[in-house]
Image: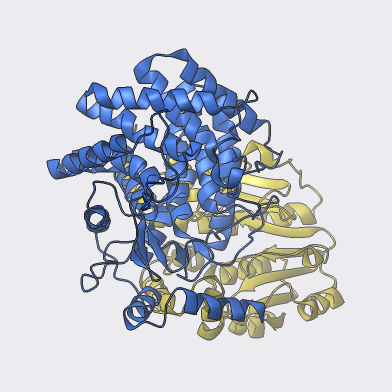
Amino acid sequence: MKIAVLAGNDRNLYACALIQKLAQAGYPPSQVVLKNNNLLNRMLRVLKVFSFRDIPAYIGKIRGAVKTDNINYQLEEYMFDNGLHKESIYQLSGRLGFQLIYTDDVNDAAMIRSLEKNRPDLIIYCSGGILRKPLLRVPVIGILNAHMGLLPEFRGMNVLEWSLFYKAPVGVTVHYIDAGIDTGDILLKREMDITQGDTINTLRMRSIVLNVELMAEAVDLISKGRAILHPNPAIEGKQYFVMHDIIRQQVEKELRGMQ
Amino acid sequence: MRKILKHIRDFVQHKVYMPGNLRVLIRTCAANEVADSRSVHMDAAMKWLCFAQDKSSCGGVSAGYSFQSGWQLPYPETTGYIIETFYDYAMRIGNNSYRFRSRQMLDWLISIQYENGAFPGGLYRADKAGNIPDPVVFNTGMILFGLVRGFNEEQDEKYLHAARRAGDWLIECQDEDGAWRKCTYKNMVHAYKTRVAWALLQLWKIAGDARYRDAAIANLEWCISRQAENGFVSSMSFFNEAPYTHTIAYTARGLLESGIILDDRRYISAAMKIAWPLLYYFEINKKLPGQFDAAWKPAGNYICMTGCAQMAIIWMKIFRHGSDARYLNASLKMNDFLVQKHCLTPAMSHINGAIMGSSPIWGDYMSYYFPNWAAKFFVESLLLEVEITKELDVRK
């Protein structure tokens, strides 16, 4: 089975772990797409929405995120335990021999042509923004995504936090991507326990580990023709957006109180 | 080219070239100071409203500050609903001077009420010949909010009496189908008069006269009969333009609050059908343009600041009523945006605490103007946020 991965940026640890996990399971990707994600490009994207005076705040946000949130100790530990190396996607390509495709936009026509030449059976989405219809039509089987919440109830952004806010179970869902927001058919979903001392950040880290596990499992099921699809009707859930800090703090507080 | 010419014309017409105005223009374009606490912003906006009241020297609140002609004449309509905000703020900070100011506003409004119970439209000015502005339905309805609140707070019968007279006139003017077509702004029929219906329901609650309730219901029914499947209601605009978020929010708020008072899910749903597309647009695009067309496509590339504050209030009220936290989430983000744009400039007392009509200030809604109602809805939104976040803190 030919697999392509949309990895986002070169330092995406989730993509790094997943690519190696798939290779270990006998499904090494043949192509990996990376976004030209330099600071200038990202700032230009911010400018489309905000203005010049938001740039300092944006840089501060990026620096803050690098210092704390982006270090996923749980994923690093998981990788170490499973013999997966922490390296850049570029380094991985040298070791595993997959083709690297660089693009400013994953929906770019030239990028889609590069993917089509190889005609992948499956594309695995790790990061890279909203996917448009031409890209959705490229793979023979479909594009898989691991969603950090339980579908169909919680669609969109920060769904782990929103699940906690509503005191609903937290977990991960692997589903196909279609033209809607997290509305493609569901392959697998698994709940996650909340344990003593958990915070939003630790739960996010754990759910990324679960993403890797579940995605590898889903690819195996598809390859063996044993995948069972479950409908994912949008009407049975709600689409959520980035959670405001005030609500996030409330969720953290309630999470501490639950333990 | 037409746009550039329009900007040049506005520049001259609004006297932007004057040094004082140029300073204000630069100030509104520069990065704003954002205080750590919402209280600082509320306090500054309330002080600016007090300043606007003092500028009119009659008890009413000046309509605002404009580049073209400085402080404006008192505006009876908005003075009417500013009364509520002053009472709310007095209660929050325990300062009776705001109550006293509310009474000044009430007494001024009663002094300008017409024989037939109506109130004048537009800014209040009696010319040399003693001609006074025509009575207007919407403005009378907005003043009704103040009179009802005044009676509830002061238990003074004169406010109830004035409110009843205003309510009776509103019923007299209403057409059989529930709409108001006589004594309206530009002689147009407007869906946003659901706010008048809401004011009549408030009067019904204190006066107990079912005629007020029935008139309100007739208007609400007329309004929802004009609502399309996508939530858009025809006639939400002042004239024939794509409606401003200001008047869209007026329409939605009237439906929502009336639905809550009457415990009628249909009106609440109708309000939510208006509120949701705007919320969705705001969440996806991180900003809410000042005008929308009937397909909920933006019809302007500026932001109507008062519309933003009004939508934040509506979203919070919907959250409070139904517990869908996406509405609260969007309103918190909207309030963040508003405080970023709020003028905290002690060196310029005439705009210190004010909210501009549009962002950028040359936008199509109240260009180069700081309207009092923008500051009013801004304070109301922050007050509600403080209240709701407290409730959130103790939720089960």
A141 lies left or right of A170: right
A43 lies left or right of B128: right
Q: Who's the residue at 83% across and 78% down the image? A: A113
What is the total number of numbered labels drawn onto the structure image?
0
Q: Who's the residue at 56% across and 29% down the image? A: B267
Rendering coords of residue A157 (x, y %): 54, 54
Q: Is residue A236 visible?
A: yes
Q: Which part of the image, by quadrant, shows the C terminus of chain B?
A: top left
Rendering coords of residue A96 (x, y %): 67, 79
Vertical comparison of A70 with B319: above or below: below
A114 lies left or right of B273: right
**Colour scheme in the image?**
by chain
Rendering coords of residue A164 (x, y %): 44, 43
Question: Chain A colour?
Answer: yellow
Rendering coords of residue B3 (x, y %): 62, 77
A31 lies left or right of B298: right
Q: Who's the residue at 60% across and 43% down the image? A: B187
Q: Is residue A166 visible?
A: no
Q: Which part of the image, by quadrant, shows the N terminus of chain B?
A: bottom right
* Chain with blue colouring: B
